[in-house]
Amino acid sequence: MIPTEWKLIAGGIGVFAFLALAWFAYLSIEAKGEAKVTAILQPQLNQARTDLAAVKAANASNLKTIATMQLDAAESDALLANYANQITDLNQQADDAGAAIRKLQTDDQTVDAYLRTAIPDSLRGVLNDAAEPRDSHADAGSPAAAAR
């Protein structure tokens, strides 16, 4: 008869073998499941990487466009500031000229008489047309703009 110790050892080896086989079966099933998941998700992962690269490229392009637009805006602002200064200077010159003419009109009777003479109608029409503001954007489709 086989001693009890040997039976216990044989039983332990059997249990160990069973657990080892179960563990290897688990690992095999897990590896197959992982392979299936990888096979399913890999195309999505590749598409996500492609999309990310496209978004990064678009972002870089957008950043360049924004930088160019900021430079253009700064140049436009400088031009507008320059035009505003020129307009201010022209307004001041017009005010000074008007004040000088008014002073001459009160100080010199010949200037006053000259300024009181009637302007011929044909010249008045030309002066009135020249005095009209011309905003090409506001009335581009109007008949008055077409007549100009």
Image: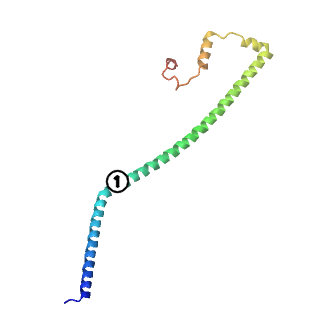
Image quadrant in which you'd find residue 35: bottom left
Kindly give the residue lying farthest to the left in the view shown.
Answer: 1
Which scheme is used to colour this image of the protein?
rainbow
Residue position for label 1: 47
Residue under the point 55% across and 24% down: 135
Q: Position of residue 122 (x, y in %)?
A: 60, 11
**In the rendered view, does 21 fall on the left or right side of 113?**
left
**Residue nearer the viewer, 46 or 14:** 14
In the rendered view, would you say 115 is above or below 27?
Answer: above
Q: Position of residue 78 (x, y in %)?
A: 61, 39
Q: Position of residue 77 (x, y in %)?
A: 59, 38
Kindly give the residue lying farthest to the right in the view shown.
Answer: 107
**Residue nearer the viewer, 7 or 143:** 7
SS label for mark 1: helix
Disc 1 residue type (three-letter): Gln
Image quadrant in which you'd find residue 103: top right
In the rendered view, would you say 101 is above or below 52?
Answer: above
**In the rendered view, does 88 fall on the left or right side of 148?**
right
**In the rendered view, does 104 fall on the left or right side of 82?**
right
Residue under the point 65% across and 32% down: 86
Residue under the point 62% across and 10% down: 121
